[in-house]
Amino acid sequence: MAKFILTKREEEIFKLLIQNKTTKEIAAILNISEKTVRNHISNCIQKLGVNGRTQAVIELIKLGILNI
């Protein structure tokens, strides 16, 4: 698989997710709507071909895109 590239915003959102932030908290921090946060997460899940946020985080860590 080619190196998976996140958009800057997607990366920001997933970095906040691994800090245990809620969708509402992420939206407030980034000054965007909760729906936009969910859309970014959904796009990543679809790109990665996984079934949820947790699997997306695990895959992004495996790919070396996120560090915990």
Image (tube, rainbow, N blue to C red):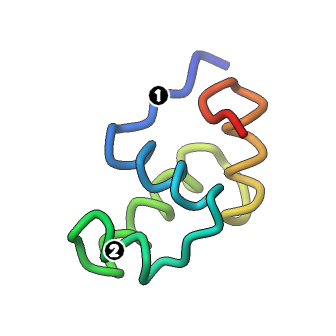
User: Residue 40: where, in percent of width, then height?
Assistant: 40, 60
Report the front residue among 42 and 11.
11
- The answer to whether residue 16 is above or below residue 37 is above
Residue lying furthest top: 2
The residue pinned by badge 2 equals 27
Is residue 36 left or right of 12 when viewed as pictured?
Answer: left
Q: In which quarter of the image is the C terminus?
A: top right
| Amino acid type, label 2 | Ala
Image quadrant where residue 64 sits? top right
Q: Distance from label 1 to label 2 (Cα)?
A: 22 Å
Q: Please say if 53 is above or below 14.
A: below
Labels 1 and 2 touching (C-beta < 8 A): no
* Percent position of residue 5, x then y: 46, 28
Which type of secondary structure does the marked residue at label 2 adopt?
A: helix
Q: Tell me the tag on residue 53.
A: none
Q: Mark 1 points at which residue?
A: 5
Task: Please name the residue shown 35% across and 81% down the image.
Answer: 34
**In the image, residue 25 lies at what x, y percent?**
43, 77
